[in-house]
Image: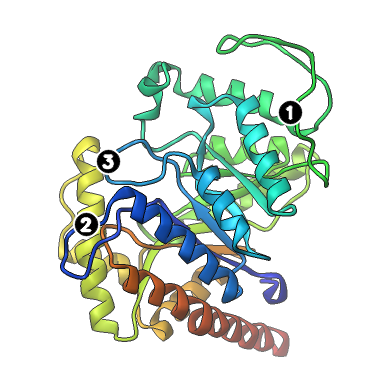
Amino acid sequence: MVDVDNLEFGIETFGDIVANEDGSLKTAAESIRQIVREGELADQYGINVIGVGEHHRPDYSVSSPETVLAAIAAVTKNIKLATAVTVLSSDDPVRVYERFATLDGLSNGRAQVMLGRGSFTESFPLFGYDLTDYDDLFNEKLVLYDQLRKEKPVTWSGKFRPSLKEQEVYPKTEKGELETYIGIGGSPESIIRAARFGYKVIIAIIGGQAERFKPYMDLYHKAAQKFDMPVYPVAVHSHGFIADDKDEAVEVAFKNIKANFDRIGLTRGWAPMSREQFDNETKVGSFYVGDPETVAQRIAKTIQLLDLGRFDLVYGAGNQTAAQRERMIELYATKVIPRVKEILSTKEGENHDH
């Protein structure tokens, strides 16, 4: 049963370069400042979370998400500040802890760590790691991060960084623990790992029907029970675009999401996205595109299907204008989210009647 009263809604950006009205591109610096403006807007509209991605490539403006989140922290009151995601495998868990504990202090306890293995691989050679160690790096670093998160002296040794002996890390957080999610792309092992550590789970559903993730929900619940760990409401993130006019939304989204996915696909061996493929994703798949009513109906369906506690819409894919991005955030907050809650509340009522 979906707990409508406690449902959370977020937005996430990977830091795509923003377009000018004439189609030319803004600088990375302008794009970063635009994200801060969007974080401020999202907070004013009452959106629960903003997530900012980490990438080290020319088509994205953000390589240091915590710094951007710190700027957002300074101009907001309530919104939670998440990374989407921090590539733990090519980072140092001690540094990760310190950066987030600092962000948590600046924001009065609003920092949210989202750890992932990284779907892009450019950070590995950049920081001197070997891709053949992809799994080992994440597993080892997660164990260390988990110890650091307890904010007690840490004694640890592994093969990818110097060992620690009775090491304290600073600053300590006011609540004694950083809120932590593990970002999952679709491997059952990742779900079990998150459950074993007692972390929250956010699943990236970037293609196909949400229904195929239903077994993952069962797996998470079973694994958490087996390891005697808490079961948290699961979060999902998916791409989308909302505009006042449905046809306009579809055209803008097709142009931008296709450009974005095709560019990524060059390095991953994907065929270019066809119109048919895109239309299928928007009708029954994982692109939430259209006017507010269309998008609200589809989000409500996914939340109910997977019994989610949180839904994050990834916005700004490709090269959208500041006006398009800001209008989308406004529509999501003022039209879509209230409508989703309304749809789900009605369904809850129907369920109680039978």
The spot of residue 101 in percent (x, y) is 70, 39
Give the label, 2 or 3, closer to the camera.
2
Q: CA distance from mark 3 to mark 1?
A: 33 Å
- Distance CA(mark 2)–CA(mark 3): 12 Å
Query: Relative to residue 201, is residue 246 depicted above or below?
Result: below
The residue indicated by pointer 3 is 58
Image-quadrant location for residue 353? bottom right
As rendered, which of 76 and 136 lies closer to the eye?
Answer: 76
- Identified by mark 3, the residue type is Pro
Query: Which residue in the protein does label 1 denote?
Result: 148
- Location of residue 227 (image quadrant): top right
Whether pointer 1 and pointer 2 mark residues with C-beta atoms closer than 8 Å, the reply is no
In the rendered image, which residue does mark 2 sit on? 25
The three-letter amino acid code for the residue at tag 1 is Leu
Going by the image, does 193 lie left or right of 258?
Answer: right
Q: What residue do we see at 61% from left, 32% from top?
A: 96
Label 1 crowd bin: few (<14), some (14–19), many (20+), radius 10 Å: many
Q: Secondary structure at mark 3?
A: loop
